[in-house]
Amino acid sequence: MDIYLPVAGLSVNALVIIALGGVVGLLTGMIGVGGGFLTTPILIFYGIPPAVAVASATTQITGTSVSGVLAHRRRKGVDYRMGGVIILGGLIGASAGGFLFRLLQQIGQIDTAIAILYVVLLGSIGILMAKESGTELQIFRKKATAKPPRRHNPLIAMLPLRWRFYQSGLYISPLAPLLLGIIGGMLTVLLGVGGGFIMVPAMIYMLGMSAQVVVGTSLLQILFVTAATTLIHATTTKSVDIVLAGLLLLGSVIGAQFGARFAQKVKPELLRMFLAIIILAVAARMAIGLGWRPEEIYTVQAL
Amino acid sequence: MRALRGALLLLLAPLALGAAEPKLVPDVSQSRIDIQYSFTGAELLLFGAIVYPGGKPPREGAEIVVVVKGPVQPLVLREKQKVAGIWMNVESARFRSAPAFYAVASSRPLAEMVDERTAAIYELGLQNLQLSPGTGAAPDVQRRFEAGLIDLMQRHQLYFEDPKGVRISEGVLYRARVNIPARVPVGNYTAETFLIRDGRVLAGAVREIQIEKLGFERFVATAADRWSLTYGLVAVLLSLFLGWSASAFFRKG
């Protein structure tokens, strides 16, 4: 079933795109990551122009994070004060990222920049996750000399202007989450990812937020920042394809619901191991793409 | 209907007695191509008649070349090179007027029909496209980029040459098929037909073809371009609505 994408300017098989959305949604529901890191590369492999893939994947993430935010809100798992600070940072980061995106587009390095960022980020996070879940599954042995983890990072404790974040159980400077938000926002614009796979570990290990509010607050941030990013892409790069985003959403919102049910029946460490393998596979595919002689040496950019 | 008109003109051909040179009566199957929801490309049929003085084709008939050309556009062509183990864009060249689409079909290979000079004048064949390179690069670099562009466009089926694509029957009726792929940009296209004998272009005619997005596709593309903020807001609202309704639906179920 071919459908013409009006902004991307080509026809795709609608069922393939819906299925892709479904698989990504299943992951979202199971593990709680937005899945943008999977959607964007696969769309690019499928032949969608990178800018359109990034922009439309962002739109899709907004939709999949809604149900997550609602679910966490019902069980009071969202720290709105912390979320607000991170979102503010995210908006600053997204605007700066939009500027950087266009700059890279103009000098013709956007594809390479996207690919390198993916390889570095996914590679390092995949390895960390595989290690952590492998240790819990007792595939690897725990290091006996591991120091007890410190809850508060001394660097962050040094920052001035402390605020109380009651739900997170923190008394820290808002500058730290603001900075974290800025980084997350830039990644969202550049890579078409929600950034949950970076924000969640950072919130736990760097800020020391209490675990009950981490996922809900991260989803709230993703919801707002991806919505803002869609607007930034729509007005600057003009590469949001609403038909493509709609097809992806159709698959992913349904997949997410099934994923959430499935998640309750499986060990969480097993799920994280599974996610780590997928992340590493995507990173490896991207790395191969960078190092291998590409099929097309030349690329055309209209002026 | 149009085929009928062509045939009719053929019957009227004897009236053109006295003209020394043969004439061309060309037509195209579609003067507009609409891009709509499941557009996977179109096939354009170029056909017509060669009208000879006296009404009878001579033993050594003329040959036909048809050229379908898309809107010209300025573009940058980037070339990847391996830098520190990574393939990335390094060099680039500008072309001021590369056609977005170029198809040439002929009844015999072009090289057998016309000499290089004539081919260059009428832009017949991929080697004779006027790409107007915009950078003051060395000639060999420029040639490399031109070859790269033509090769790339050929593999995307946006440029092609078919040396046997025109069929001439009875020496008077000709027809050629040109495939328009799904990725073509919208705009004004031209279909040129040339009548060639003894290395000379005897007659030529141009028909215009419009390729346009239509209906919903046109609406979306225009909205994305002109009302980009509203378009973005609608995209966000759509995704919020779909996400919310799925979660509401499944919670009940």
Image: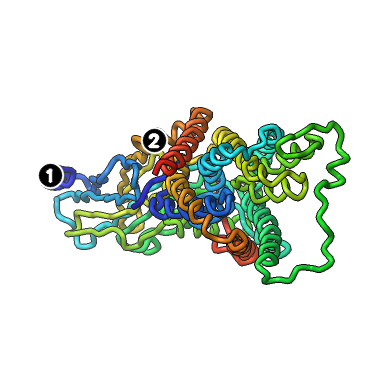
Is residue A189 shown above or below A139? above
Residue at the image position 19 percent from the left and 51 percent from the top: B52
Chain letter of disc 1 in the image: B
Provide residue A254's location: percent of width, then percent of height.
Answer: 44, 48
Which badge, 2 or 1, comes first in the chain's sequence?
1
Task: Name the residue that disc number 2 marks.
Answer: B218
Residue B184 falls left or right of residue B197: right
Closer-to-camera residue (B176/B242):
B242
Q: Secondary structure at mark 1?
A: helix
* Drawn side of residue B231 relative to residue A136, left or right: left
In the rendered image, which residue does mark 1 sit on? B8
Position of residue B201 in the picture relative to residue B156 (left or right): left
Q: Nearer the viewer, mark 2 or mark 1?
A: 2
Give the class, few, some or many, for how many residues have Cα within 10 Å of label 1's Cα (few <14, many ≥20).
few
Give, as a three-letter code, the residue at label 2. Arg
Q: Are marks 2 and 1 in contact (CB under 8 Å)?
A: no
| C-alpha separation, residue under disc 2 versus residue under disc 1 | 38 Å
Q: Position of residue B94 (x, y in %)?
A: 60, 47
State which quarter of the image contains the C terminus of chain A: top right
Q: Nearer the viewer, residue A81 or B226?
A: A81
> What number is the disc on residue A122?
none
Residue at left 34%, top 43%?
B37
